[in-house]
Image: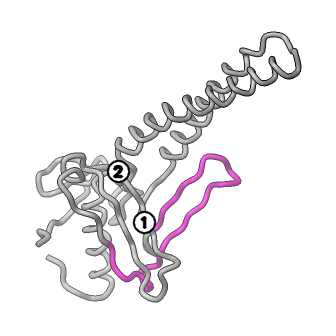
Amino acid sequence: MMENRTLHINDRGDIIGTSERALGPVIEQNSPFLVFRLSWVAYAREGVALLLRLLVCCIGFMLVSVALQRFTKMGDMSWLTVLGALLAIVWTAYSIAFTNSVRLFTDDAGVWMQSGVFPWEKGVTGVQWRDLGQAGYNQGFVSWILRSYDVQVTHRFSTTTEMYLRNVHRGNLAVEHINQVMAQLQGRVVR
């Protein structure tokens, strides 16, 4: 059973839960709508991905350099391995920047996810309040300890417009907030 909790906003624009600790920023000062970022767990995954990318890129580029040296009788091609490592680092830097750009937020129109690093890839996807089915999150011991939840926002009429966002920091509070706003918009009393 989920406990009912009211989220408040202090004078600095931070979300305050029942324990009076700041939980994160809001869109605007005194706004009833909130913004949620990804947890540190998403960045830890990028660290593991860096190791895998380094392994694959360095080995791949090393094999290419050995093949070029052997079959074309070219000189020292060891710089290709360094190029592979550089490619893996740039790839990971982009992935971290993309992870940092992801935001789950609510406004007067609905629930939205914003992401993108470059101007041509920036975008927003979401569900309008009138079409929102429900919001939920996956519960578990690891999620509770890490405070990193997978959040799912469903559409009432279609499964193709659902939002599923992994590793949302305090995603349980995001789901509570979304369901609370949806209930208020539908005219139900929320305590």
Q: Which residue is mark 1?
A: 164
Residues 68 and 25: in front is 68
Q: List x then y, in percent, for residue 48.
A: 43, 36
Q: Quadrant of the C terminus?
A: bottom left
Q: Amino acid at mark 1?
A: Tyr
* Name of the residue lying farthest toward the front: 71
Q: Is residue 103 magenta?
A: no
Magenta region: which residues?
112-135
- Label count reads 2
The numbered mark, 2 or 1, whose residue comes first in the sequence reads: 2
Residue at 37% across, 55% down: 36
Q: Which residue is mark 2?
A: 25
* Name of the residue lying farthest toward the top: 75
Q: Amino acid at mark 2?
A: Pro
Residues 22 and 97: in front is 97
Residue at 49% across, 85% down: 158
Residues 41 and 133: in front is 41
Residue at 70% across, 54% down: 120
